[in-house]
Image (cartoon, grey):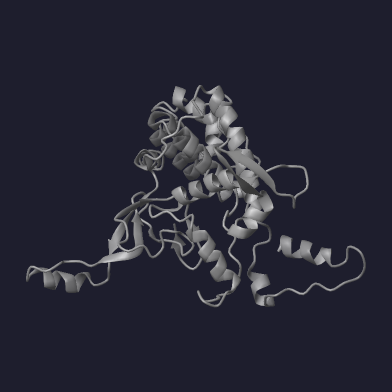
Amino acid sequence: KAQAAQRTGRAGRVSEGVCLRLYPEESHDLLKETTVPEILRVNLAQVVLQLKGMGVHDPRSFSFLTPPTPESIDKSFEVLMALGAIDKSMNLTAYGKEMSQLPLDPIYAHLLLQSAKFECVSEILTVVAMLSAENIFFRPGGRGGEDSGGLASKAAAAHRRFASYEGDLSSLLNVFNAWKKEAIYTRSGNPRKKQRVNKGKGSFAKMLHGDWCGQNFINGRALMRAHDVRSQLSDLCSRLGMDINSSCGSEMATFYKCVCAGLFLQVATRLPTHLESEGKKKSRSGRAGMIPSRGHYKTKIGGKLVSVHPTSFMFGRNPAPKCVVYTDLLYTTKLYI
């Protein structure tokens, strides 16, 4: 209700006005008086890790403006212990000190530090930076068919060149690598001017950042932010003694192993379909017992039923993978990964 009242005040900033609320009065009466503080709604693992890095031994005794629940802090301790950031005595480990120096969610910090073991720091730097930005892919509204020439269908066709069969992380890596290879990113100068860049025996024309993003339906601002975040993370990793130029090259299996090692806490396995009972009957006659479902999974930790989000490149994959790792959970009409 506090936010709704603030919106009402906007209508009279310059002169007298009217605020139209696009919901019934009954819905307004059901709203809470004030917004729930963010510290009570989010994962506190990063907050706890930062406090430990600052020398606060027990974050539960820290004087928060709005104290979080003891359960949320205990859950954060469990996550940090699983990642190896703290020991059984709740003391910060040497690995945890390195994680606390990275301004990332502990899961992503762990993923980045693991990349040094698999010698694919360059690729993981790119992926973590792309995940730190807002949605990279620009998807116009509308449902133009494949042959209708609508913007939605053109965007889907443009995005297919970056799609990876193995999922979204390698697809984001493809976007960044293609952008670095085909586009020129400058903070100043004529934005409409194209330049020629020599490479090998011949030469080819690189497109400027805005033109390339428009042609490929990529969020240019998000891509610039990912570039800046990657640069900052590279400096921090260099201070930790990591070789930021180490790359797995075309050995993508190494990259996927690193992703699994870094996101081992966020794993989901495919569910059987509702035809299980029928399958059991068939199995008596020697036929398959269960028909694997497509896009429906159960998380290993928490046991939540989730589905692959329609915007994921993994959506609709046939056959669906038996096991996946995911970066976050999204709840709309149901829970998505």
> Residue 101 occupies which quadrant of the picture?
top right
In the image, 32 versus 236, the foreground residue is 236
Quadrant of the rendering where the C terminus is positioned: bottom left
Q: Position of residue 300 (x, y in %)?
A: 33, 50
How many numbered dots are placed on residues in this image? 0
**Is 194 situated above or below 89?**
below
- Residue extending farthest to the front is 201
323 sits left or right of 199 in the view = left
In the image, 289 versus 150, the foreground residue is 150
In the image, 182 versus 4, the foreground residue is 182
Q: Position of residue 251 (x, y in %)?
A: 37, 39
- Residue extending farthest to the right is 15
Whether residue 259 is visible, yes or no, is: yes
**Is 335 situated above or below 145?**
above
Whether residue 56 is visible, yes or no, is: no
Q: Residue at x 65, y 76 (%)?
A: 26
> Residue 278 occupies which quadrant of the picture?
bottom left
Q: Residue at x 54, y 70 (%)?
A: 153
Quadrant of the rendering where the N terminus is positioned: bottom right
> Residue 316 occupies which quadrant of the picture?
bottom left
- Residue extending farthest to the left is 285
198 sits left or right of 261 in the view = right
Q: Position of residue 137 (x, y in %)?
A: 57, 57
**Is 89 situated above or below 1?**
above
In the image, 227 versus 305, the foreground residue is 227
